[in-house]
Amino acid sequence: MAGSHGGSPKSWLAVIVILIGFTVGGVALCIGPSWMLFWVGAGIVAVGGVIALLVDIFSDVIIDAPRVPLDHTS
Protein backbone atom coordinates (compact mmCIF):
# COMPACT_ATOMS: atom_id res chain seq x y z
CA MET A 1 0.00 0.00 0.00
CA ALA A 2 2.84 2.37 -0.83
CA GLY A 3 1.92 6.02 -1.11
CA SER A 4 -1.36 5.57 0.74
CA HIS A 5 -2.64 6.50 4.17
CA GLY A 6 -5.12 3.64 4.23
CA GLY A 7 -3.88 1.83 7.31
CA SER A 8 -4.29 -1.83 8.10
CA PRO A 9 -7.65 -3.56 8.65
CA LYS A 10 -6.86 -4.19 12.33
CA SER A 11 -6.24 -0.47 12.84
CA TRP A 12 -9.53 0.33 11.13
CA LEU A 13 -11.26 -2.12 13.46
CA ALA A 14 -10.04 -0.09 16.44
CA VAL A 15 -11.12 3.17 14.82
CA ILE A 16 -14.59 1.81 14.00
CA VAL A 17 -15.09 0.57 17.58
CA ILE A 18 -14.09 4.00 18.92
CA LEU A 19 -16.45 5.75 16.47
CA ILE A 20 -19.31 3.48 17.55
CA GLY A 21 -18.61 4.39 21.17
CA PHE A 22 -18.63 8.12 20.40
CA THR A 23 -21.86 7.71 18.44
CA VAL A 24 -23.56 5.83 21.28
CA GLY A 25 -22.40 8.45 23.79
CA GLY A 26 -23.49 11.33 21.56
CA VAL A 27 -26.93 9.86 20.96
CA ALA A 28 -27.28 9.25 24.70
CA LEU A 29 -26.63 12.92 25.41
CA CYS A 30 -29.14 14.01 22.77
CA ILE A 31 -32.03 11.77 23.85
CA GLY A 32 -32.13 12.61 27.49
CA PRO A 33 -29.44 12.77 28.56
CA SER A 34 -29.35 9.07 29.31
CA TRP A 35 -26.33 8.79 31.56
CA MET A 36 -26.31 5.00 31.62
CA LEU A 37 -26.17 4.85 27.81
CA PHE A 38 -23.53 7.59 27.81
CA TRP A 39 -21.27 5.52 30.07
CA VAL A 40 -21.88 2.46 27.89
CA GLY A 41 -20.58 4.55 24.97
CA ALA A 42 -17.59 5.64 27.05
CA GLY A 43 -16.89 1.99 27.83
CA ILE A 44 -17.00 1.13 24.13
CA VAL A 45 -14.51 3.92 23.45
CA ALA A 46 -12.24 2.50 26.17
CA VAL A 47 -12.46 -0.97 24.59
CA GLY A 48 -11.56 0.57 21.24
CA GLY A 49 -8.57 2.26 22.87
CA VAL A 50 -7.38 -1.07 24.26
CA ILE A 51 -7.79 -2.64 20.81
CA ALA A 52 -5.78 0.24 19.31
CA LEU A 53 -2.97 -0.38 21.78
CA LEU A 54 -3.03 -4.13 21.18
CA VAL A 55 -2.77 -3.78 17.39
CA ASP A 56 -0.09 -1.07 17.80
CA ILE A 57 -2.06 1.49 15.81
CA PHE A 58 0.65 4.15 16.17
CA SER A 59 3.13 2.09 14.16
CA ASP A 60 0.63 1.85 11.32
CA VAL A 61 1.79 5.08 9.70
CA ILE A 62 2.73 5.13 6.05
CA ILE A 63 5.06 7.96 5.16
CA ASP A 64 4.96 9.25 1.60
CA ALA A 65 7.98 10.55 -0.26
CA PRO A 66 8.63 14.25 0.38
CA ARG A 67 6.51 16.58 -1.70
CA VAL A 68 8.27 19.14 -3.83
CA PRO A 69 6.35 22.39 -4.27
CA LEU A 70 5.87 23.55 -7.85
CA ASP A 71 7.45 26.84 -8.80
CA HIS A 72 4.63 29.03 -10.14
CA THR A 73 6.74 32.18 -10.52
CA SER A 74 7.94 31.51 -14.08
Image (tube, grey):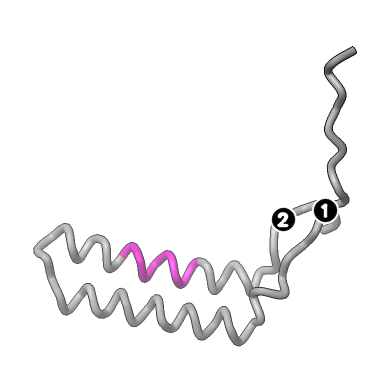
Q: Nearer the viewer, residue 38 or 73?
A: 73
Q: Does the magenta stretch include residue 65?
A: no
**Is 69 located above or below residue 27 in the figure?**
above
Q: In which quarter of the image is the C terminus?
A: top right
Please report the bounds of the magenta region as a residue range.
Answer: 16-23
**Is 45 located above or below residue 5 in the figure?**
below
Q: Is residue 17 magenta?
A: yes
**Is 31 located above or below residue 56 in the figure?**
above
Q: What residue type is labelled 1?
A: Asp
Category of crowding for the residue at label 1, using alpha-carbon neighbours closer than 10 angstroms: few (below 14), some (14–19), many (at least 20): few
**Is 57 located above or below residue 30 in the figure?**
below
Residue 25: x and y in percent read 27, 68
Residue at numbered disc 2: 5
Principal SS element in the magenta part? helix
Residue at numbered disc 1: 64
Q: Which residue is drawn at 46% across and 72% down?
A: 17
Q: Which amino acid does label 2 sit on?
A: His
Q: Which of marks 1 and 2 is nearer the N terminus?
A: 2
Q: Quadrant of the N terminus?
A: bottom right
